[in-house]
Amino acid sequence: EIVMTQSPATLSVSPGERATLSCRASQSVSSNLAWYQQKPGQAPRLLIYGASTRATGIPARFSGSGSGTEFTLTISSLQSEDFAVYYCQQYNNWPTFGQGTKVEIK
Amino acid sequence: QVQLQESGPGLVKPSETLSLTCAVSGYSISSGYYWGWIRQPPGKGLEWIGSIYHSGSTYYNPSLKSRVTISVDTSKNQFSLKLSSVTAADTAVYYCARHRGSGYDRPFDYWGQGTLVTVSS
């Protein structure tokens, strides 16, 4: 099993500021990495796949980078609707998810 | 627009079998893609359960494989999950979703709204 570790567990950010979320894989997953956003009571929404490709309809303020075992999701200027929990997921092997990073209002 | 909708009992007794169905609209399962089940215990993270292709080919999470069966009914455009010998640890919101691309080793691009299943006597 490939274990995905996200940090930090909680990130406190002011609206308009930049948020940087990290995800580490226990072994290389190449670029087979996705990011999801989940709001309370809702299903996850695909933001990024292939480590850096935005899914359809995702604003340009969301960007992903990395390969191998280290990945980053950056939200360039946080909007009110961006406060949520973010999960990374590898699909190089059978799918596994990180434990999530909660982005909260500072 | 692809839409997925989970249905099934919201309460299951310990040791019994959990059964859920995912109805797909806006896309024919027979046209391709893998279709999967993911669960999320209350307040916790996401766990992939397994996925199926329209041909019936399946892949399961090794930790759940002995208890999971996923099947597909292309005539009804739906797929189903059975999880046997459930315990309280199986209490979760269960989501069905579509893999983006023709493989189970792909991210999930369309999700159902999820259904809470509680295991309790």
Image (cartoon, rainbow, N blue to C red):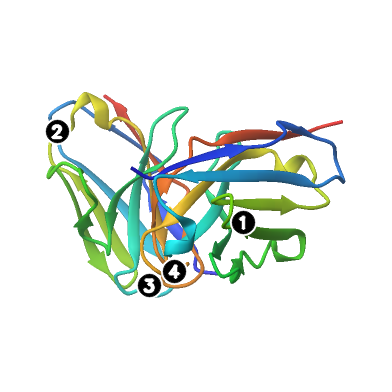
Q: How far across and down, in percent of the image, does residue B119 sit?
A: 77, 36
Q: Amino acid at mark 1?
A: Asp
Chain to which mark 4 belongs:
B
Q: Which residue is mark 4?
A: B105
C-beta proximity under 8 Å, tags 3 and 4 = no
Chain to which mark 1 belongs:
B
Q: Which residue is mark 1?
A: B73
Q: Amino acid at mark 3?
A: Val
Q: How far across and down, in percent of the image, does residue B115 sit?
A: 59, 34
The residues tagged by marks 1 and 3 sit, at their Cα atoms, a distance apart of 33 Å
Secondary structure type for disc 4: loop
The residues tagged by marks 4 and 2 sit, at their Cα atoms, a distance apart of 34 Å
Q: Nearer the viewer, mark 4 or mark 2?
A: 4
* Residue A29: image tag: 3
**Could you confirm whether marks 3 and 2 are on the same chain?**
yes
The residues tagged by marks 3 and 2 sit, at their Cα atoms, a distance apart of 30 Å
Q: Which residue is mark 2?
A: A17
Q: Nearer the viewer, mark 3 or mark 2?
A: 3
**Could you confirm whether marks 4 and 2 are on the same chain?**
no
Question: Would you call the spot at circle 2 few (<14 residues within 10 Å), some (14-19), or many (20 or more)?
Answer: few
The residues tagged by marks 4 and 1 sit, at their Cα atoms, a distance apart of 22 Å
Residue at screen point 63% across, 45% down: B21
Question: Would you call the spot at circle 1 few (<14 residues within 10 Å), some (14-19), or many (20 or more)?
Answer: some
Q: Amino acid at mark 2?
A: Glu
Judge from the rendering whether residue A8 lies leftward or rightward of residue A93; answer left or right: left
Q: How far across and down, in percent of the image, does residue B51 sit?
A: 56, 61
Q: Nearer the viewer, mark 1 or mark 2?
A: 1
Can residue A98 be seen here? The reply is: no
